[in-house]
Image (spheres, rainbow, N blue to C red):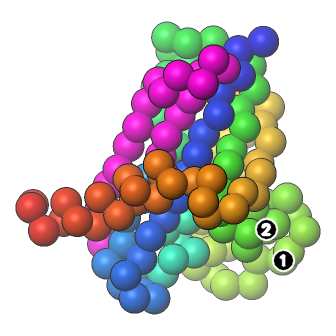
C-alpha cells in the first residue's frame, strides 16, 4: 500500500490578518515528495488552516497521476479543524462551513481513503515555516 503523509499549516498575523499556508507531503519512506507555500491574503487562522488542507488536495490530485496513493494521512496542529472534520465538533462559523464542505467534496472526488490527525505544533515545524514563508513572500511580490 502506498501511503502518503501530509502536514499542513495555516498562519495569520492578526486574526484576521495577512495569511499564508504551508504544506509538506512525504512518501511512505519519509521522503519529502512535495512542498508548498503561498500567501493567501487576509484570513483568520482557522480559514488559513482549512485553505492549507484544501490546497493539499490539489497537490495530491497532481501527484496521483504519477504516484500510486492508497491512503492519505493528514497531520495538522489545528485541533478545531481536525475535530470538525472528524465530526467531533460542529462547524458553527459560516465561512468555515463553506471550507468544510469544499474539503469533503474534493476528498470524495479523490476517492482515496484518509485519516486526519491532530498533532502538537512542535511536530509541525516544517509546514509552519512554509506558512510563514508564504506571508513573508507577499512582501516580495
Looking at the image, which residue sits at the far front?
Answer: 122
Quadrant of residue 84 within the rendered picture: bottom right
- Residue 54 vertical position relative to residue 6 in the rendered view, above or below: below
Q: Nearer the viewer, residue 126 or 20?
A: 126
Question: Whole-percent x and y of residue 31?
Answer: 53, 22
Q: How far, Cα to Cα, is label 1 from label 2?
A: 6 Å
Taking the spot 77% from the left edge, 48% from the top edge, the residue there is 116
Looking at the image, which residue sits at the far left?
Answer: 140
Which residue is under mark 1?
A: 90
Question: Which SS class for mark 2?
Answer: helix
Q: Quadrant of the C terminus?
A: bottom left
- Residue 141 vertical position relative to residue 98 in the rendered view, above or below: above
Q: Is residue 28 visible?
A: yes
Which stretch did the figure color magenta? Answer: 23-41
Q: How many C-alpha atoms fall within 10 Å of the one at disc 1: few (<14), some, or many (≥20)? A: few
Question: Whole-percent x and y of residue 39?
Answer: 29, 62
- Residue 22 vertical position relative to residue 32 in the rendered view, above or below: below
Which numbered tag is attached to residue 65? Answer: none
Which residue is under mark 2?
A: 84
Q: Which secondary structure type mostly characterizes the magenta part of the structure?
A: strand
Question: Whole-percent x and y of residue 85?
Answer: 78, 60
Q: Left or right: 123 with respect to 63?
A: right
Q: Left or right: 13 with respect to 94?
A: left
Q: Is residue 53 visible?
A: no
Quadrant of residue 101 within the rendered picture: bottom right
Q: How many C-alpha atoms fall within 10 Å of the one at disc 2: few (<14), some, or many (≥20)? A: some
Taking the spot 56% from the left edge, 29% from the top edge, the residue there is 26
Q: Nearer the viewer, residue 135 or 70?
A: 135
Q: Quadrant of the N terminus?
A: top right
Question: Which SS class for mark 1?
Answer: loop
Amino acid at each position: 500500500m502506498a501511503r502518503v503523509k501530509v502536514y499542513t499549516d495555516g498562519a495569520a498575523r492578526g486574526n484576521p490578518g495577512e495569511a499564508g499556508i504551508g504544506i509538506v507531503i512525504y512518501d511512505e519512506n519519509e521522503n519529502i515528495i512535495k512542498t508548498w507555500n503561498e500567501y493567501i491574503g487576509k484570513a483568520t487562522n482557522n480559514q488559513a488552516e482549512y485553505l492549507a488542507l484544501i490546497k493539499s488536495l490539489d497537490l495530491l490530485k497532481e501527484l496521483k497521476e504519477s504516484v500510486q496513493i492508497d491512503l492519505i494521512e493528514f497531520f495538522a496542529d489545528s485541533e478545531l479543524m481536525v475535530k470538525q472534520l472528524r465530526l467531533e465538533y460542529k462547524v458553527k462559523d459560516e465561512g468555515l462551513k463553506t471550507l468544510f464542505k469544499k474539503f469533503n467534496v474534493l476528498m470524495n472526488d479523490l476517492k482515496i481513503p484518509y485519516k486526519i490527525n491532530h498533532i502538537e505544533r512542535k511536530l509541525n515545524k516544517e509546514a509552519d515555516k512554509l506558512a510563514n514563508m508564504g506571508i513573508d513572500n507577499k512582501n516580495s511580490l
